[in-house]
Image: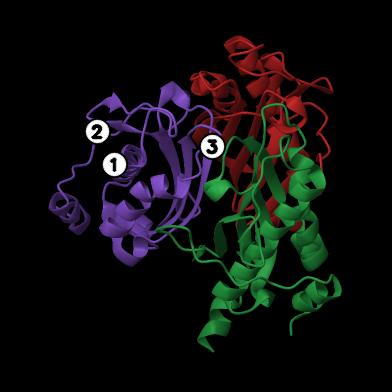
Chain colours: A red, B green, C purple
């Protein structure tokens, strides 16, 4: 078991089953030393976390939804890379929060994912980020987050070994 | 004529004239082995495809708008790179769908572009993606899509030859 | 004083104090020869520029808000890189404009940042861009813009010298 999965266990969290893409794309593309992770929608135990901040979901529930997106990003990375030890740095998260026009706490919501990355990957988990509100997300989910992740330079060699 | 343009012809599609940027930027920047393609708005035969999903446009029309964005991405790549054979991999599409707050089929709409990339580029066209709803897009268009595209390593050398 | 800061002065502009992240992330991550700049919210002289285009803010004010985001991106780059001379190319801006569903001039608004980059960095400031409308942004700001910036290849060596 990897160190990162040890930390997950200590936090009482488990990686979800990587969700199949909702449509005609793939969860992770590796190119130029980076893994580009498709927007992951909020879901837990196989069920979508639906809602709209400022309407039927409070900030704590929004943070939990964002954490679920973060867990799915990690699960997709593990499935695509084989091991989370290949992650050099979480570079960028792009967080989209379904909300009403008067909701302005997108950063607090997105922290659900950002704090997870920092807890799991330490300094390597501290990332750049954008967080914006949107009127609607796929399947009615509350949060969608995509990611750019730098891979260890030795990754390709390790795979060939 | 390139293989990709052969496939376009077989699909009954033609590349549009690359649209000039709406404003003070450029359609494609090549950096670090990647082509970053500006958000392309839905247009066909020089006319904007306007509308809002969930209001005055159905999913089929939305998919056609997304396909038009995809065609324009390909047209911009050809104009910037000289040849589509320089494309190694479609890495990431970022799809923005103008919609009402109760519209949740952004993935189906974005498939209009994703399926085009797969049809044209094969495995190299299978990409990571995010798809989100937005209340409004430039000039009232229905869909805007940007892209990150990996270039063949030999590209620079070929240009110097 | 660098050339770029000379140009800022000639334009009557000064770099703002780099804003602390609103939440659990970092303003700039350097990876793979690129600087990824977190979404910068519109603020001037330490005060947020709030508003919604199409409602309580006109295009000129929106452009000024976008310019303020651009200045903050430059300020964050300087703080993270030490010198703006390490910037090789402004690669991509992602502009999010808080607006009503009937507002369609996101490109004009985003030009506030795009024209700044071109004025400061010349050809190296001409970038790819997406610009979309959103219903709400963090803290009620009018504009948020993130960036991908290519660094000079000699940057690491210069830092080691």
Residue at position x 84%, y 38% in the image: A20
Residue under circle 3?
Answer: C102
Discs 1 and 3 lie in a common subunit: yes
- SS category of the residue bearing label 2: loop
Residue C54 got which mark? none
Horizontal side, residue A5 vs residue C60: left or right? right
* Residue farthest toward the front in the current orientation of the protein: B56
Residue under circle 2?
Answer: C17
Dot placed on the residue nearer the N-terminal end, 2 or 3: 2
| CB under 8 Å between discs 1 and 2 | yes
- SS category of the residue bearing label 1: helix
Mark 1 and mark 3: span between their CA atoms? Answer: 33 Å
Indicate the position of residue C43 as horizontal and vertical percent values: 31, 31
**From where the camera sits, is residue C37 visible?**
no
Horizontal side, residue C66 vs residue B121: left or right? left
Q: Which chain carries label 2?
A: C
Residue at position x 74%, y 33% in the image: A138
Q: In which quarter of the image is residue A58?
A: top right
Q: A43 or A15: nearer the eye?
A: A43
């Amino acid at each position: 078991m990897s160190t990162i999965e040890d930390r997950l266990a200590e936090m009482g969290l488990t990686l979800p089953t990587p969700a199949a893409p909702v449509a005609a794309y793939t969860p992770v593309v590796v190119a130029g030393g980076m893994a580009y992770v498709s927007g992951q929608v909020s879901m837990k135990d196989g069920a979508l976390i639906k809602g709209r901040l400022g309407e039927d979901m409070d900030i704590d529930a929004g943070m939990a939804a964002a954490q679920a997106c973060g867990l799915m990003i990690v699960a997709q990375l593990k499935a695509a890379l084989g091991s989370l030890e290949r992650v050099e740095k979480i570079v960028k998260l792009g967080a989209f929060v379904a909300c009403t026009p008067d909701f302005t706490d997108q950063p607090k919501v997105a922290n659900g994912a950002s704090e997870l990355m920092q807890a799991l990957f330490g300094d390597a988990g501290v990332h750049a980020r954008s967080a914006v509100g949107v009127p609607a997300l796929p399947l009615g989910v509350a949060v969608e987050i995509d990611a750019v992740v730098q891979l260890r330079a030795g990754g390709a060699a390790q795979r060939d070994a």
